Image (cartoon, rainbow, N blue to C red):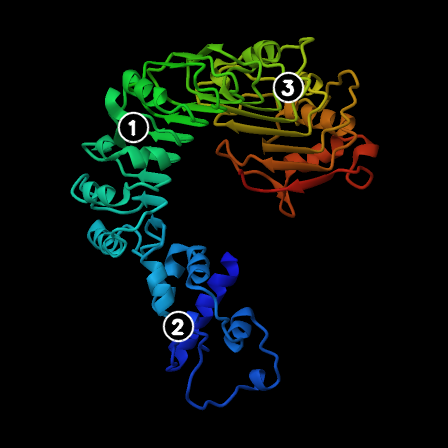
Amino acid sequence: MRAVAAAAVRGLATRRRRATPRIRDPTQNGLITSMGKRKESPCQQDNHNDSLPSKLMRTRIPDLPEEIWSHIHSQLPMRDAGRAACLSRAFLRSWTRHSKLVFDKDTIAVKKNSYGENFHHKISRILSNHSGISLKTFKLDYSGICGFDGTSYLDSWLQAVLNPGIEEVTLWLSDTRRKYEFPCSLLSDGVRNSLRYLKLRFCALHPMVELGPLRSLTSLHLFFVTITWDELKCLLSNSLALEELELVFCEEIVCLKISCALHRLNSLHITECSNLKVIESKAPNLSSLKLIGHGLNFSRVETLQMKKLIIERTIHDARNRLPSIMPNLETLAIYSDLEYQAVAAPILPTKFLYLKHLAIRLSSGTTITQAFDYFSLVSFLDASPSLETFILNVNQKRMIHESISAHPQLRHTHKHRHGHLKSVKICGFSSVKSLFELTRYILENAVSLECLTLTPFMGFGVVRVSVQGVPLCLIMFLWTLPKRSRLSGHTSSTKFHPQLN
């Protein structure tokens, strides 16, 4: 419906620019057309102009209740909804009752890196036209907008939009000398009963004990937000319906203790909260966990129900601990720094019995002194009998690994049939010998493989030799394959991408 409505609006706007039409209200069974005599184009005479806007222009608009037209209008993107208000009195009335307002440099149509005064003026004018209307969604994104002064506009805007019925509030602000303090005093009983989604960036949030329960809040996302643990604890204790909690660069939080009262919480994401060291969770249904940052201790987190884990850990620690404490994992993503890495992943009998999706990102700086054995990642593959997709992203700033050109003899290991592995992607493929050995192992043992994507790494500050656009390291790799695994006889497809994704 949204696509059809948007096409109709574009068609009406084009027609209006080309002629001087008499526009009747859609609710009055009017036909939007020009009243003057015009010659038909050859396309119109031959009925070849079958585009959607043209069909809509030739069709009489049905006599529908204004509530239905308002619903159609509400499905339009904000810019199209504003344009439609210029074409019809019904759409104009619907525009003043539009319940979803999204303000960014695209919807307000400001130039890149323009200053904010014009941006502020447009928002204030639109909000004044919507005064007294119960909004459902309010999103303000200051990305690319200069001249934000902090508080002079936001206080009045939030006072206008934080009314009973509001469901989603997003303040994506820019970094300023003084963070904007979100007005918790505006969270009245009616607002707390309807608010479901709250996302703040570069704000200060200081909820008090007398805040009161946010009965409908299910998603809370805080980015660069100034809030202490006691204040966050107050907020969580009043948000018993919470399902998603995300904390990114919230440096004032020193500990996080989630009680069993948050029985609906299923997703917890924590990224680079530098002072947060201890995480405790008794939430019984927590199934998705993201922990990015050094020193995060999650030993007090209930993990038996965990199905999705994104974590920053060494390969050795992840392979050694995770299978036993998270036996039901289905998706695992590991971010690891090679500078703090053991030279190889351990070979252990423990299994990821239900793991279907595995992603490993290995990065290194310029101070790395020991080479990691990528072939040892076979330990993860052999421990995951249900694995369907495997992604390896290698980001090396310094080349210290053994090259296949210097030592072409490849290692072999025991045969292990992988009957579910269908898709493998290696980003940063290079002439490192252990990468050749890992890829060869996958091709020989993944009998159900459908797609192998190798994205070569173009770094190390040297020129890479290529033949017809294919890097030499990939050509060398193809020749190392056994005859039955060559592209002409293997069921998998190999894609070559010259850039690093």
Seen as rendered, the residue at the extreme front is 65
x and y percent of residue 117 in the render? 19, 52
Q: Amino acid at mark 3?
A: Leu
Identify the residue under disc 1.
Answer: 225
Q: Amino acid at mark 2?
A: Asp
Front residue of this view, candidates 477 and 144: 144
User: How busy is the neighbourhood of tag 3: few (under 14 within 10 Å), some, or many (20 plus)?
Assistant: many
Q: Which label belongs to residue 25?
A: 2
x and y percent of residue 174 in the render? 27, 38
Left or right of residue 343, residue 351 in this image: right
Residue 128, above or below 44: above
Q: Residue at x 32, y 51 (%)?
A: 105
Write down the quadrant of residue 342 in the picture.
Answer: top right
Instruction: Give how far apart the Cα atoms at labels 2 and 1 are.
Output: 47 Å
Left or right of residue 428, residue 451 in this image: right
Seen as rendered, the residue at the extreme left is 152
Query: Quick one: SS at disc 3?
Result: helix
Instruction: Give how far apart the Cα atoms at labels 1 and 3 are.
Output: 38 Å
Q: Earlier in the sequence, mark 3 or mark 2?
A: 2
Q: Amino acid at mark 1?
A: Val
Closest to the camera, between mark 3 and mark 2, is 2
Q: Residue at x 49, y 72 (%)?
A: 61
Counting every numbered tag in the picture gives 3
Q: Which label belongs to residue 377?
A: 3
